[in-house]
Image (cartoon, rainbow, N blue to C red):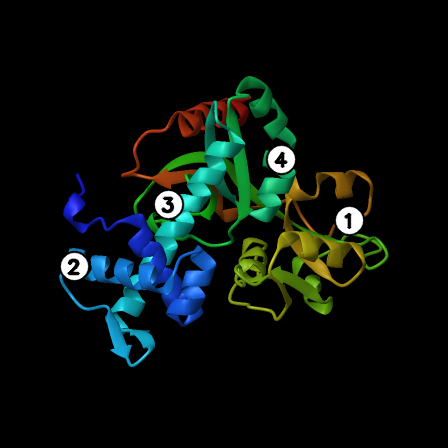
């Protein structure tokens, strides 16, 4: 349990944060609809509660000490978290909220088409989605869970496996009139690859009997833009099969050579190990497990 001894009053924290941000007691007073004297009193109260000086009083100016400036950065994060919690409560006063970090391609092509079923089964839960491309520290974020691609290498989380991934070499039919007769013929075409997976073409060539190669390729930060590049004839791309099922069916992309190969990673739902159990996350885990197994 947190000691209330180290929990200063909200008016004092707001006064300190406003002085730090606006640069003066008068500006802070105007923003908070207080007098300058009230701002000064709140700062004195805070210094008394913490037992140390936070303010350098230089004639009529107030300046924060270096330690107080660091303290203010932490206060600002805490105030933002409180504000977000209040907005979340107002948006769904009778239920719960699940803040989920997603990967763009998986979110758009696998998760989004299924979310309506979750909403129908759990109308009491509001799901908020935000894109994150790489692992992050749950302790310093507002997320309850995340979609992760790779291996089980995200520290401090629990994993629910969702889906393995297979990659297929594809190109626009105008670029590739017919499938290649040998895998290494791919080297005569411009290649496209994801910047976070620069070894994929080397693995693809090794899978087809041509090891120890790392061909150059145009880099993309997301599969969606790389797929569009391939569709418009920019080059041959290695893309997850689940992402391009429609494009293959509509003949906007065609296989270049061979069947799909397995990716090095898989997709997981992850959440912090030490987090308290929350009903929205439990409902979502149970639902997505059923979707995975359907």
Image height of 44 relative to 110, above or below:
below
Residue 17 appears anywhere in the view:
yes
Q: Earlier in the sequence, mark 3 or mark 2?
A: 2
What residue is pinned by disc 3? 152
- Are the residues at dot 3 and dot 4 in contact (C-beta closer than 8 Å)? no
What residue is pinned by disc 4? 112
- Percent from the top left, x then y, of residue 229? 74, 59
Residue 203 badge: none
Q: Which circle, 3 or 4, is nearer the viewer?
A: 4
Q: Residue 23 sits in which quadrant?
A: bottom left
C-alpha gap between disc 4 and disc 1 = 23 Å
C-alpha gap between disc 2 and disc 1 = 69 Å
Between 260 and 198, the one nearer to me in the picture: 198
- Are the residues at dot 4 and dot 1 in contact (C-beta closer than 8 Å)? no
- Percent from the top left, x then y, of residue 286? 44, 23
Q: Which circle, 4 or 2, is nearer the viewer?
A: 2
Q: Residue 144 sits in which quadrant?
A: top left
- Percent from the top left, x then y, of residue 163? 51, 36
What residue is pinned by disc 2? 48
Image height of 190 relative to 12, above or below:
below
Query: Judging from the image, what secondary structure is the residue with disc 3 in?
Result: loop
């Amino acid at each position: 349990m947190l000691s209330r001894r180290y929990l200063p009053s909200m008016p004092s924290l707001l006064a300190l944060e406003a002085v730090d941000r606006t640069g003066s007691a008068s500006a802070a007073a105007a923003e908070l609809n207080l007098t300058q004297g009230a701002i000064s009193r709140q700062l004195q109260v805070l210094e008394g509660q913490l037992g140390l000086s936070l303010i350098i009083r230089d004639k009529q100016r107030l300046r924060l000490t270096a330690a107080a400036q660091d303290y203010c950065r932490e206060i600002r994060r805490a105030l933002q978290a409180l504000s977000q919690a209040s907005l979340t409560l107002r948006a769904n006063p009778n239920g719960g909220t699940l803040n989920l970090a997603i990967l763009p391609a998986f979110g758009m092509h696998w998760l989004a088409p299924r979310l309506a079923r979750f909403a129908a089964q759990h109308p009491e839960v509001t799901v908020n989605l935000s894109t994150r491309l790489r692992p992050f520290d749950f302790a310093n974020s507002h997320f309850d869970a995340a979609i992760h691609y790779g291996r089980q290498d995200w520290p401090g989380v629990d994993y629910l496996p969702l889906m393995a991934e297979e990659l297929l070499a594809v190109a626009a039919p105008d670029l590739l009139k017919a499938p290649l007769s040998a895998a290494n013929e791919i080297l005569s075409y411009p290649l496209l690859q994801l910047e976070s997976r620069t070894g994929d073409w080397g693995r693809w060539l090794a899978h087809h009997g041509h090891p120890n190669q790392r061909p150059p390729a145009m880099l993309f930060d997301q599969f969606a833009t790389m797929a569009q590049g391939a569709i418009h004839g920019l080059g041959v791309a290695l893309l997850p099969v689940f992402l391009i099922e429609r494009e293959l069916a509509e003949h906007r992309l065609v296989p270049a050579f061979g069947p799909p190969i397995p990716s090095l990673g898989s997709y997981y739902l992850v959440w912090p190990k030490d987090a308290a159990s929350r009903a929205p996350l439990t409902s979502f885990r149970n639902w997505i497990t059923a979707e995975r197994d359907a």
